[in-house]
């Protein structure tokens, strides 16, 4: 399978716990994006990478959110001290060339209780 | 401030007929537009795109039209099939390789 994969697919955590999500992009894609989607809304951009360089992180929702792509392949998104408002679908996408579209993974559904 | 707007939350169409989904944008810097289809509990699936140098792009049953002057695009699905029932998102970017700005989506129901 050469699509974008995300792990885990579902995560239930208690408020205050830290969570980490992983995204494996399509192998030759050099750009990797993280989005968040809540009910009734379109995906909302969080951060993105070109290879290992994080090009934009000002849209991360708070300083509790951080992302890495250490070797320019897979990426992780961490949320520290989770809050109930963090409950959402977290989506990862990757792309190669301009004007070729971004391809999304299946998402990680986070529920904070 | 919503830069990409899908003003119809839902649309119902009979099987075999044409489905037309609309999208408006406000940022004239956008130069690349995409449509995605999304089923519940899955990630968005890329359908079709168009760059601002074109006004039409076709792929099988799907055609996207772009009217730059009106800052409007539309997705036509002909003929509509029950499997097309999903939420459709319009998205836009600038330079064709930057983070996407999405609309809120339109739920299409194709009735057999």
Image (tube, coloured by chain):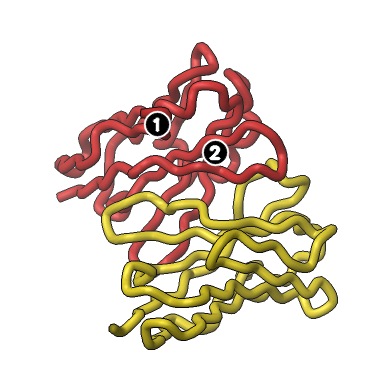
Chain colours: A red, B yellow
Q: Which is more toward the observer, A11 or B97?
A: B97
Q: Residue at x 37, y 45 (%)?
A: A90
Q: Which is more toward the observer, B2 or B58?
A: B58
- In terms of secondary structure, where does tag 1 sit? strand
* Number of the label disc, if any, that sits on residue A110: none
Label 1–label 2 contact, CB within 8 A? yes
Spot occupied by residue B14 in the image (x, y as percentages of width and height): 38, 87
Q: Residue at x 21, y 34 (%)?
A: A17
Q: Residue at x 15, y 50 (%)?
A: A113
> Could you tell me how far apart the alpha carbons at marks 1 and 2 are, in whole angstroms?
10 Å
Q: Which is more toward the observer, B89 or B25?
A: B89
A23 w.r.t. A91: above or below: above
- In terms of secondary structure, where does tag 2 sit? strand
* Number of the label disc, if any, that sits on residue A77: 1
Q: Which is more toward the observer, A14 or B70?
A: B70
Spot occupied by residue B48 in the image (x, y as percentages of width and height): 59, 57
Circle 2 residue: A47
B60 relative to A105 in the view: left or right: right
């Amino acid at each position: 399978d050469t699509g974008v994969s995300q792990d885990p697919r579902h995560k239930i955590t208690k408020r205050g716990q830290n969570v980490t999500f992983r995204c494996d992009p399509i192998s030759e894609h050099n750009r990797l994006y993280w989005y968040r989607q809540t009910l009734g809304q379109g995906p909302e951009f969080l951060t993105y990478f070109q290879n290992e360089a994080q090009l934009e992180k000002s849209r991360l929702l708070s300083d509790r959110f951080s992302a890495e792509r250490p070797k320019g392949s897979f990426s992780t998104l961490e949320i520290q001290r989770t809050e109930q408002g963090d409950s959402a679908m977290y989506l990862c996408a990757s792309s190669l060339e301009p004007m070729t579209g971004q391809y999304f993974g299946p998402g990680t559904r986070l529920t904070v209780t | 401030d919503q830069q990409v707007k899908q003003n119809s939350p839902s649309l119902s169409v009979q099987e075999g007929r044409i489905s037309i989904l609309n999208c408006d944008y406000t940022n004239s810097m956008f130069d690349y537009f995409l449509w995605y289809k999304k089923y519940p509990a899955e990630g968005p699936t890329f359908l079709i795109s168009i760059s601002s140098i074109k006004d039409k792009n076709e792929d099988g049953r799907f055609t996207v039209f772009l009217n730059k002057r009106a800052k409007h695009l539309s997705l036509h699905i002909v003929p509509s099939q029950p499997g097309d029932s999903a939420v459709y998102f319009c998205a836009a970017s600038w330079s064709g390789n930057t983070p996407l700005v999405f609309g809120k989506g339109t739920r299409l129901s194709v009735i057999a």
